[in-house]
Image: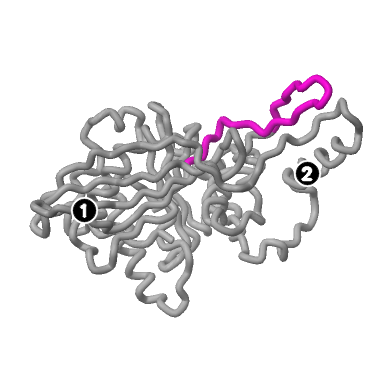
Amino acid sequence: MGITKNNRKESPRRPTRNTRSVQLVGRETKGEETRRKLASARSQGPDEPVASSRPRRRRNDGHSVTDDGVPMNNRHLQGQLRLDLGAFVSVSGRKSYLKSISADIMFTPDGAAQEEKVGYFLIYVVDKSVNDTVVVRKSGRKVNKTRTWISELLLPWVGGKLASLSMALRSLYEEDGTPLATFVERFGQMLIPTTMVYIDKLEIKSNLEGKGFGLVAMQSLHRLLPLVCGTDKDIGVLLQPDFIPKKDREAKRKGKQEELMLFYPKHGYEVIYQEEDTLPCFFLMGRLLKGEEGSGRKDADSDADEEDSEMMDLD
């Protein structure tokens, strides 16, 4: 069992949808301090550093990965499953620290002429090595500042599509990007890699759940992540099963979370943080994907039972 709200000093504040309604009292946050300094720099003349332009629009960075697929044979069906990974989309800037990747889960039954979509992934890749930069106008000299993931994701008012990613990271890291002391002893190796992957969604069509698609899709994702991330080093992987509360379906949500807590450990995941002692509640799971796991070696979760192979909506 992971760290619960009751045995850590303070649980992270969950971001609200109306991000402007958050009121900060007391000392100035690092984000506020950074914006204040940059605003001051802009007004101090041409030799002072000014923030480099980082467009917020999404763009295709041209990077993509091809999956040749793997055989899928169980008592339910036989065929070929592959992940159809779309091009990577930079969420912020020309030298982006954050990319999103969508991957359709495609299946071709034996003897069939066409493949069909049976589900999909949505993941975010965070490059923790990318720095914010400021440029001195006159000399063109660049000056490294705070790591971008720290200045943009570890803020309590991050909302929209990145709200759950931000909340996951703020649950595990200090404001300066170091892992919270509570998690270092048990989960430090999972939290220190330069590359972090956050699985935002993994859905299998409801009429196909329990057929084994989730099992093979998860193994395929683990196999491809080193190529997706462009690294042969360790990768930290996080996910939030059933993040958004469904208040009118609490009983069903509780059952879903119980199933997920049994399913994911068979793929190497552990519960890192759990907000409450009882389900349903917000909780985080994660694992360390060793660099050599992308080299064709049998994946650590390949022995998971087919009976537990259905995947749920992580969002």
Q: Is residue 259 above or below residue 97?
A: below
Residue 126 at what x, y percent from top left?
A: 51, 40
Farthest right residue? Answer: 44
Q: Is 269 situated above or below 290?
A: below
* Kind of residue sitting beneath label 2: Arg
Q: Is residue 127 magenta?
A: yes
Query: Vertically, is 242 above or below 170?
Result: below
SS under mark 2 = helix
Q: Is residue 133 above or below residue 149?
A: above
Magenta segment includes 165: no
State the mark number for residue 115: 1
Residue 10: image quadrant is: bottom right
The amino acid at mark 1 is: Glu
Q: Which quadrant does the C terminus fall into?
A: bottom left
Residue in front for this viewpoint, 273 or 97: 97
Q: Which one is closest to the eye, mark 2 or mark 1? A: 1
Q: Which residue occupies 73% across, 25% down?
A: 143
Q: Which residues are magenta?
A: 125-145
Residue 314 in the image: x percent, y percent? Answer: 40, 59
Instruction: Please report the residue visible at 74 percent of the width from the left and 31 percent of the height from the top.
Output: 134
On residue 35, which mark appears? 2
Query: Which residue sits at x=62%, y=64%?
Result: 16
Q: Which mark is residue 57?
A: none
- Where residue 290 appears, x then y in whole percent? 35, 32
